[in-house]
């Protein structure tokens, strides 16, 4: 049997565009869809029913699992858009809560809407007092991500009035609660790991300043948030707010497709993000800098990176999606330098290694030819360390920022009339039918 796929030569935008699939003597037709921008998509949802065949796509890297109007990525061109807005414009000019409003509601808020939305988020930052007992149940050396998974999932036990996913009002309340309470939970996890007393949120501070205050203030003295550091934190949140259908976002959507409450879905996303191949890249980049140690050792590690037989890899360079310069990295690079200047710590050995490595990677022909540019993880690890966060908090901050993206994707999925419970298929390679043999005859 010969399997031949032919796509009709039909102009973009035509509603009758089809792909013809020939399987033996059978010819099947499938519709072709055009997004606003991006590659065309062949709808194979009826393939199995029409032919008895599945498609095989490990990691779903060539499969669109949904329609979405939230985020668009063009990795070849280095483009990332939130609802059509370039990421660098949002990060340079807007605020994180403004970006949250955009991702949730599809447009940028006007001044009154921004004030009202910020006020609603601010007045949801407190968590139920009984939740403080959860932290005491963890070992002092528990990883903060373990605490995040448990506490975020537990929110459903405290906020029953926002778990009915069929009610748009409850969905909106749950969205606000998640965005508002995530910084509080993250800060509590950090304080617990350091042995310091917890700090309650303050309604007179903006979102990022409030988070920094909860993390670094102590009861015995006044703590003033540096506006440069607060702005840097806000940019980090914006740059990590959403990134299309990545592993954790797909996890949130898959969990939500079963009808699970939003708190459980976000907890599932946090668990997925915990994986070192996803949310732990900036921590890995920092470990690499520590391994290099000093500037004079950089040439040695550059040689190792170029050696195909050496297992060493430069972490924080290149990206699975972006084959051009990661658009988030440009803003993160600028932000990193602003933070280092504000804190006056450019002479720290680890940061000197990072700056020299960055310079080499941007000029070395090997890296330029292979497009191994420094990515956002390279710069964010440096910046977060400079801000005072230990490496095991890096992924927690990633989860905090990504919460709004997860929530926006979850809401879109719930409201999608084509939504069905997720059920990937498989290519079975196990034993065929076998007869049971009694244990005494084996």
Image (spheres, rainbow, N blue to C red):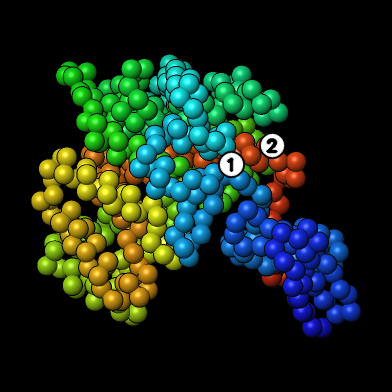
Residue 441 location, x and y as percent? 74, 69
Secondary element under disc 1, as helix, strand or loop, is helix
Where residue 327 sits, quadrant-wise, is bottom left
Of residue 28 and residue 201, the one placed in the foreground of this image is: 28
How many numbered badges does the structure rendering display?
Answer: 2
Q: Which residue is at a point 78% across and 79% down the rendered structure image?
A: 3
Q: Position of residue 46 (x, y in %)?
A: 81, 59
Name the residue: 66% across, 26% down. 168
Looking at the rendered structure, which numbered label has been put on residue 428?
none
Query: Image quadrant for the N terminus?
Result: bottom right
* Residues packed near mark 2 inside 10 Å, few (<14), some (14 to 19) or many (20 plus): few
From the viewer's perspective, is 374 left or right of 386?
Answer: right
| In-image side of 201 versus 104 (left or right) | left
Image coords of residue 20 (percent x, y): 80, 71
Camera-side residue: 124 or 258? 124
256 up-or-down from 436: above or below: above
- Mark 2 residue element: loop
Q: Which residue is mark 2?
A: 415
Real-space CA distance between mark 1 and mark 2, rounded to the nearest whole angstrom: 10 Å
Picture quadrant of residue 440: bottom right
Q: Is residue 374 above or below residue 335?
A: below
Looking at the image, which residue is at 13% across and 62% down?
A: 294
Q: Position of residue 315 (x, y in %)?
A: 33, 62
Q: Is residue 149 left or right of residue 396?
A: right
Residue lying at the far bottom of the rendered structure: 1
Quadrant in which the C terminus is drawn: bottom right
* Residue ID for mark 1: 409
Residue contact between numbered discs 1 and 2, judged by CB atoms under 8 Å? no
10 Å crowding of disc 1: few (<14), some (14-19), many (20+):
many
Upstream in the sequence, badge 1 or badge 2?
1
């Amino acid at each position: 049997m010969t399997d031949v796929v032919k796509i009709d030569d039909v102009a973009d935008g035509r509603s009758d565009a089809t792909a013809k699939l020939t399987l033996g003597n059978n010819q099947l037709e499938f519709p072709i869809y055009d997004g606003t921008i991006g590659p065309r998509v062949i709808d194979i949802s009826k393939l199995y029913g029409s032919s008895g065949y599945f498609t095989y796509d490990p990691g779903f890297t060539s499969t669109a699992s949904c329609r979405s109007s939230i985020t668009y990525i063009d990795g070849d061109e280095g483009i990332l858009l939130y609802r059509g807005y370039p990421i660098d414009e949002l990060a340079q000019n807007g605020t994180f809560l403004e970006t949250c409003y955009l991702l949730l509601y599809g447009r940028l808020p006007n001044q009154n809407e921004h004030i009202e939305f910020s006020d609603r988020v601010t007045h949801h930052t407190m968590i139920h007092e009984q939740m403080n007992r959860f932290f005491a149940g963890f070992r002092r050396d528990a990883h903060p991500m373990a605490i995040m998974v448990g506490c975020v999932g537990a929110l459903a036990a405290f906020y029953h009035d926002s778990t009915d996913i069929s009610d748009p009002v409850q969905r909106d309340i749950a969205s606000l609660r998640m965005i508002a309470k995530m910084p509080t939970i993250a800060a509590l996890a950090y304080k617990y790991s350091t042995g310091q007393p917890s700090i309650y949120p303050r309604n007179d501070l903006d979102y990022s300043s409030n988070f920094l205050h909860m993390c670094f203030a102590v009861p015995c003295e006044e703590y003033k948030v540096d506006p440069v550091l607060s702005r840097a934190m806000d940019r980090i949140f914006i740059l990590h707010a959403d990134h299309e259908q990545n592993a954790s976002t797909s996890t949130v959507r898959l969990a939500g497709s079963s009808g699970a409450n939003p708190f459980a879905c976000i907890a599932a996303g946090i668990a997925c993000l915990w994986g070192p191949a996803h949310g732990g890249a900036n921590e890995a980049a920092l470990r690499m800098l520590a391994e290099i140690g000093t500037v004079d050792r950089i040439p040695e590690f550059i040689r190792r990176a170029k050696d195909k037989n050496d297992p060493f890899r430069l972490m924080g360079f290149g990206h699975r999606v972006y084959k051009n310069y990661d658009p988030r990295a440009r803003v993160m690079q600028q932000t990193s330098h602003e933070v280092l200047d504000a804190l006056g710590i450019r002479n720290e050995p680890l940061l000197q290694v990072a700056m020299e490595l960055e310079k080499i990677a941007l000029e070395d022909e090997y890296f330029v030819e292979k497009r191994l540019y420094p990515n956002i993880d390279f710069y964010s690890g440096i910046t977060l360390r400079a801000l005072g966060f230990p490496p095991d908090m890096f992924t927690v901050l990633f989860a905090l920022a990504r919460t709004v993206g997860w929530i926006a994707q979850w809401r879109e999925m719930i409201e999608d009339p084509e939504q069905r419970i997720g059920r990937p298929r498989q290519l079975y390679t196990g034993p065929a039918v076998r007869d049971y043999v009694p244990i005494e005859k084996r």
